[in-house]
Image (cartoon, rainbow, N blue to C red):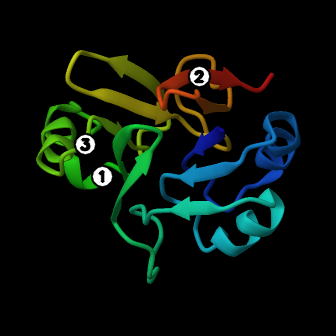
Amino acid sequence: MTVLIISDTHGILANLDKVIPRVKPDLIYHLGDCQGQEDLIAQMANCPVECVRGNCDFMSALPRKVITTLGRHQVMLTHGHLYDVKYSTGELALAAEKEGCDTVMYGHTHWPELVITDKMTIVNPGSISLPRQPGRMPSFVVCDVDKEGDLHFAINYLE
Protein backbone atom coordinates (compact mmCIF):
# COMPACT_ATOMS: atom_id res chain seq x y z
CA MET A 1 0.00 0.00 0.00
CA THR A 2 1.24 3.49 -0.88
CA VAL A 3 0.22 6.53 1.15
CA LEU A 4 0.77 10.07 -0.10
CA ILE A 5 1.23 12.48 2.82
CA ILE A 6 0.74 16.18 2.12
CA SER A 7 0.03 19.36 4.02
CA ASP A 8 -0.48 23.06 3.64
CA THR A 9 -1.85 23.17 0.10
CA HIS A 10 -3.72 26.39 0.97
CA GLY A 11 -6.12 25.92 -1.94
CA ILE A 12 -3.28 25.71 -4.50
CA LEU A 13 -3.49 22.28 -6.13
CA ALA A 14 -1.36 22.50 -9.30
CA ASN A 15 1.58 20.59 -7.76
CA LEU A 16 -0.71 18.01 -6.22
CA ASP A 17 -2.19 17.45 -9.67
CA LYS A 18 1.34 16.53 -10.86
CA VAL A 19 2.15 14.31 -7.88
CA ILE A 20 -0.95 12.11 -7.74
CA PRO A 21 -0.37 10.39 -11.12
CA ARG A 22 3.33 10.04 -10.30
CA VAL A 23 2.80 8.40 -6.90
CA LYS A 24 -0.48 6.55 -7.66
CA PRO A 25 -1.45 6.47 -3.97
CA ASP A 26 -3.89 4.04 -2.39
CA LEU A 27 -4.58 6.59 0.35
CA ILE A 28 -3.86 10.28 0.97
CA TYR A 29 -3.34 11.97 4.33
CA HIS A 30 -3.74 15.77 4.19
CA LEU A 31 -2.42 17.32 7.39
CA GLY A 32 -4.31 20.57 7.33
CA ASP A 33 -4.71 23.93 5.65
CA CYS A 34 -6.51 22.57 2.61
CA GLN A 35 -8.79 25.62 2.87
CA GLY A 36 -12.05 24.04 1.79
CA GLN A 37 -10.54 21.99 -1.03
CA GLU A 38 -10.95 18.57 0.62
CA ASP A 39 -13.74 17.51 -1.75
CA LEU A 40 -11.78 18.61 -4.81
CA ILE A 41 -8.69 16.78 -3.55
CA ALA A 42 -10.78 13.63 -3.06
CA GLN A 43 -12.03 13.92 -6.67
CA MET A 44 -8.48 14.39 -7.95
CA ALA A 45 -7.14 11.48 -5.89
CA ASN A 46 -9.41 8.64 -6.94
CA CYS A 47 -8.60 7.04 -3.57
CA PRO A 48 -9.61 7.65 0.06
CA VAL A 49 -8.45 10.97 1.53
CA GLU A 50 -8.18 11.69 5.25
CA CYS A 51 -7.94 15.40 6.12
CA VAL A 52 -7.47 17.19 9.42
CA ARG A 53 -8.19 20.84 10.17
CA GLY A 54 -5.36 23.35 10.16
CA ASN A 55 -5.15 26.87 11.52
CA CYS A 56 -6.24 28.31 8.14
CA ASP A 57 -9.23 25.98 7.75
CA PHE A 58 -11.70 28.52 9.09
CA MET A 59 -15.25 27.30 9.77
CA SER A 60 -14.22 23.75 8.83
CA ALA A 61 -15.92 20.68 10.27
CA LEU A 62 -12.75 18.62 9.77
CA PRO A 63 -11.37 17.00 12.94
CA ARG A 64 -8.34 18.57 14.65
CA LYS A 65 -6.73 15.13 14.97
CA VAL A 66 -7.33 11.62 13.75
CA ILE A 67 -6.05 8.44 15.37
CA THR A 68 -5.79 5.63 12.83
CA THR A 69 -4.05 2.35 12.16
CA LEU A 70 -1.60 2.08 9.28
CA GLY A 71 -0.01 -1.31 8.83
CA ARG A 72 0.88 -2.46 12.33
CA HIS A 73 1.26 1.10 13.64
CA GLN A 74 -1.00 3.51 15.49
CA VAL A 75 -0.78 6.93 13.87
CA MET A 76 -1.88 10.38 14.99
CA LEU A 77 -2.66 12.87 12.22
CA THR A 78 -2.79 16.55 13.14
CA HIS A 79 -1.85 19.94 11.75
CA GLY A 80 0.50 20.72 14.61
CA HIS A 81 -0.33 24.33 15.42
CA LEU A 82 -1.94 23.31 18.72
CA TYR A 83 1.34 21.68 19.82
CA ASP A 84 3.80 24.58 19.23
CA VAL A 85 5.60 22.64 16.48
CA LYS A 86 7.34 25.75 15.18
CA TYR A 87 9.50 25.58 18.32
CA SER A 88 9.76 21.86 19.05
CA THR A 89 8.03 18.55 18.38
CA GLY A 90 8.33 17.47 22.02
CA GLU A 91 4.76 18.37 22.98
CA LEU A 92 3.47 16.75 19.79
CA ALA A 93 5.33 13.49 20.47
CA LEU A 94 4.00 13.38 24.05
CA ALA A 95 0.43 13.91 22.81
CA ALA A 96 0.81 11.09 20.29
CA GLU A 97 2.29 8.80 22.93
CA LYS A 98 -0.66 9.53 25.26
CA GLU A 99 -2.97 8.46 22.42
CA GLY A 100 -1.11 5.13 22.18
CA CYS A 101 0.55 6.08 18.88
CA ASP A 102 4.07 5.28 17.74
CA THR A 103 3.86 7.56 14.69
CA VAL A 104 2.71 11.16 14.40
CA MET A 105 2.23 13.12 11.20
CA TYR A 106 1.86 16.90 11.18
CA GLY A 107 2.20 20.00 9.00
CA HIS A 108 2.01 23.74 9.77
CA THR A 109 5.72 24.59 9.47
CA HIS A 110 5.94 24.15 5.67
CA TRP A 111 9.30 22.42 6.33
CA PRO A 112 9.70 18.67 5.66
CA GLU A 113 10.96 16.56 8.54
CA LEU A 114 11.41 12.87 9.24
CA VAL A 115 12.63 11.78 12.68
CA ILE A 116 12.70 8.11 13.64
CA THR A 117 13.54 7.05 17.20
CA ASP A 118 12.94 3.87 19.18
CA LYS A 119 9.71 5.31 20.62
CA MET A 120 8.26 7.58 17.95
CA THR A 121 8.34 8.36 14.24
CA ILE A 122 7.62 12.03 13.48
CA VAL A 123 6.71 12.94 9.91
CA ASN A 124 6.12 16.36 8.35
CA PRO A 125 5.71 16.44 4.55
CA GLY A 126 6.40 20.18 4.36
CA SER A 127 4.24 22.02 1.85
CA ILE A 128 3.56 20.90 -1.70
CA SER A 129 2.30 24.41 -2.54
CA LEU A 130 4.05 27.00 -0.35
CA PRO A 131 7.38 25.60 0.89
CA ARG A 132 9.45 27.61 3.39
CA GLN A 133 12.59 25.52 3.91
CA PRO A 134 15.90 26.63 2.33
CA GLY A 135 15.63 26.17 -1.42
CA ARG A 136 11.83 26.33 -1.16
CA MET A 137 11.23 23.11 -3.10
CA PRO A 138 7.65 21.81 -2.89
CA SER A 139 7.69 18.64 -0.81
CA PHE A 140 5.60 15.62 0.12
CA VAL A 141 6.14 12.26 1.78
CA VAL A 142 5.46 8.82 0.35
CA CYS A 143 4.90 6.02 2.85
CA ASP A 144 5.06 2.45 1.63
CA VAL A 145 3.44 -0.11 3.91
CA ASP A 146 5.09 -3.49 3.44
CA LYS A 147 3.53 -6.96 3.84
CA GLU A 148 4.60 -7.12 7.49
CA GLY A 149 2.87 -3.80 8.19
CA ASP A 150 6.08 -1.80 8.58
CA LEU A 151 6.13 1.80 7.37
CA HIS A 152 8.84 3.12 5.04
CA PHE A 153 8.93 6.90 4.58
CA ALA A 154 10.62 9.03 1.93
CA ILE A 155 10.60 12.80 1.64
CA ASN A 156 10.17 13.81 -2.01
CA TYR A 157 10.60 17.14 -3.80
CA LEU A 158 9.20 18.62 -6.98
CA GLU A 159 11.69 20.42 -9.18
Q: CA distance from mark 2 to mark 1?
A: 21 Å
Q: Residues within 10 Å of mark 1 (few under 14, many from 20)?
A: some
Q: CA distance from mark 3 to mark 1?
A: 19 Å
Q: Residue 100: x and y, percent?
A: 18, 46
Residue labelled with disc 2: 155
Residue labelled with disc 3: 101
Tell me the amino acid under the disc marked 3.
Cys
Find residue 81 and name its label: 1
Tell me the amino acid under the disc marked 1.
His
Look at the picture and state if 92 lies above or below 122: below
The one nearer the camera, 39 or 149, is 149
Is residue 133 shown left or right of residue 14?
left
Question: For numbered disc 3, what is the local secondary structure?
Answer: loop
Q: Residue at x 62, y 41 (%)?
A: 3
Which badge, 2 or 1, comes first in the chain's sequence? Answer: 1
Q: Residue 123: x and y, percent?
A: 42, 31
Which badge, 2 or 3, comes first in the chain's sequence? Answer: 3
Q: CA distance from mark 2 to mark 3?
A: 21 Å
Tell me the amino acid under the disc marked 2.
Ile
Q: Residue at x 77, y 47 (%)?
A: 16
